[in-house]
Amino acid sequence: MIEENLKNIRSTMPEGVTLVAVSKTKPIPMLQEAYDAGQRHFGENRVQELEEKNATMPNDIHWHMIGHLQSKKVKKIAPFVHLIHGVDSFKLLQEINKQALNNNRTIDCLLQFHIAQEATKFGFSVEEVQSLLKSDEFVTLKNVRILGVMGMATFTDNEEQVRAEFSVLKAYFDQLKTDFSAELPHFSVISMGMSGDYKIAIQEGSTMVRVGSSIFGSR
């Protein structure tokens, strides 16, 4: 079933869009099935679960931290994490830089924007990011690499609202890429779209989608 689901999803995705299989709460055999079907990008939203799965699964997997990340937990995933999607504060970015330095590596990150109408979602405003990128402190962060942006649309059946929110994130990306090309030389990723809305997200410019239930089934 998982192999079939992956095939079906990949057949709807254009070249250049990365599929992150959201494996949170799923048992190892299900991840292994996806791995055997060729999937290499997996997303987790809890640090402890991410640690446990990294210790068990093959070491060529690219692990994505897609949930809200507390600064005090960064050191647990710093040795191996491939991409941190939810950077939503300068304090967190500083801690990622510190732990990356401790592990003698550079950690790739996405800046999370608040594009939904739900107050429960985390993220920067575009003004906050502009201030951050202009700051003297940002220049000192040598062990983080900002690859792009991430955002989550409102959980709603209103497709036009979802499309509008995704288009806002794409506009933020374009604006930052233009205004801060020197500060952001690796800026290329727009992470938006999940099982229910990834096709809309791709139409609006997403280069990375985070799909869980459409691959592994509902909980």
Image (cartoon, rainbow, N blue to C red):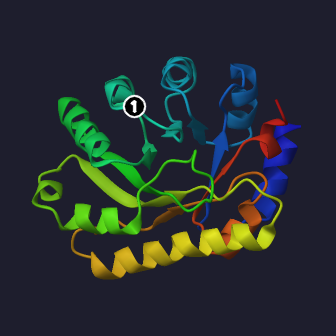
Q: Residue at x 18, y 56 (%)?
A: 138
Look at the numbered disc 1 and give the secondary structure of its residue. Answer: loop
Q: Residue at x 46, y 61 (%)?
A: 149
Query: What is the three-letter code of the residue carrying label 1?
Result: Gln
Q: Pick the quarter of the image with the N terminus.
A: top right
- Given residues 86 and 49, the one toward you in this image is 86
Q: Is residue 209 left or right of residue 161?
A: left
Q: Position of residue 104 (x, y in %)?
A: 20, 35
Q: Position of residue 46 (x, y in %)?
A: 54, 27
- Given residues 212 and 179, the one toward you in this image is 179
- Given residues 83 and 119, the one toward you in this image is 119
Circle 1 sits on which residue? 70
- Given residues 131 and 183, the one toward you in this image is 131
Q: Position of residue 20 (x, y in %)?
A: 62, 47
Q: Is residue 185 left or right of residue 120?
A: left
Q: Which quadrant of the figure has residue 168?
A: bottom right
State whether residue 75 appears in this view. Answer: yes
Badge 1 crowding class, 10 Å Cα cut-off, few under 14, some 14 to 19, many 20 or more, is few
Q: Residue at x 22, y 68 (%)?
A: 183
State whether residue 79 appears in this view. Answer: no
Give the answer, above or below, for where 62 lies relative to 56: below
Q: Which quadrant of the figure has residue 23?
A: top right
Q: Is residue 198 left or right of residue 69?
A: right
Q: Pick the quarter of the image with the C terminus.
A: top right
Give the answer, above or below, for where 117 lies relative to 213: below
Give the answer, above or below, for where 162 lies relative to 26: below
